[in-house]
Image (spheres, grey):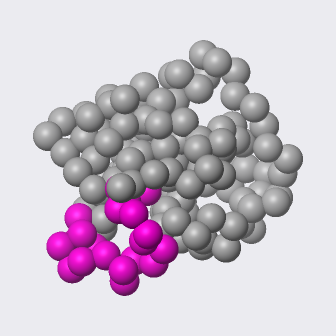
């Protein structure tokens, strides 16, 4: 049975569901930062997924990346699977700007986490969810 890792649960909020993945937003307001987590138990690497699930993961990742470009008009989308702190397979999607405080370096540890103002968080979630909602995605 799928269960979200405790660290992801503490650091994120649920935005919605794709066919394969749960979509989360990271609580750090420094960046538009979203995370896909395949709803599969005991999966720590992409190669642990079936061929069909790998293709679905790529489809969902591309849908999310395109939505982030549509909503935020970033200079670059960073997509990464690290898993050093959280072994559960999860894929970070971060909209980056040449003007952000970590550019051009990775975001991890570059700036202290910044808490969202409630209305900004709600607007960010709604703006991405509204672009994605349809046959393949349902908002939380």
On the picture, is 134 further left or further right than 65?
left
Residue 48 shown in magenta: yes
The x, y position of residue 123, in whole percent, is: 51, 22
State whether residue 90 is above or below residue 124.
Answer: below
State whether residue 108 is above or below residue 128.
Answer: below
Which quadrant does the C terminus fall into? top left
The x, y position of residue 119, in whole percent, is: 60, 16
Residue appearing at x 36%, y 80% in the figure: 48
State whether residue 125 is above or below residue 68.
Answer: above
Residue 10 shown in magenta: no
On the picture, is 126 further left or further right than 93?
left
The x, y position of residue 103, in whole percent, is: 73, 60
- Please identify the residue farthest to the right as the structure is shown: 112
Q: Quadrant of residue 59?
A: bottom left
Residue appearing at x 47%, y 37% in the figure: 14
Residue 109 visible, this orientation: yes
State whether residue 122 is above or below residue 72.
Answer: above
Which quadrant does the N terminus fall into? bottom left
Q: Quadrant of residue 25?
A: top right
- Please identify the residue farthest to the front as the structure is shown: 1
Magenta-colored span: 37-56
Residue 62 visible, this orientation: no
């Amino acid at each position: 049975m799928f269960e979200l890792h405790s660290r992801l649960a503490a650091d994120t909020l649920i935005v919605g569901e794709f066919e394969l993945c749960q979509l989360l937003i990271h609580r750090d307001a420094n960046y538009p930062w979203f995370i896909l987590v395949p709803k599969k138990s005991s999966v720590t690497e992409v190669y642990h997924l079936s061929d069909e699930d790998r293709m679905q993961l790529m489809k969902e990742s591309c849908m999310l990346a395109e939505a982030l470009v549509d909503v935020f008009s970033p200079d670059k989308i960073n997509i990464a699977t690290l898993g050093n702190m959280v072994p559960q397979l999860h894929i970070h999607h971060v909209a980056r700007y040449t003007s952000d405080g970590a550019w051009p370096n990775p975001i991890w540890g570059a700036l202290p986490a910044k808490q969202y103002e409630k209305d900004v968080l709600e607007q960010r979630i709604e703006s991405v969810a509204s672009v994605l909602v349809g046959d393949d995605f349902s908002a939380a």
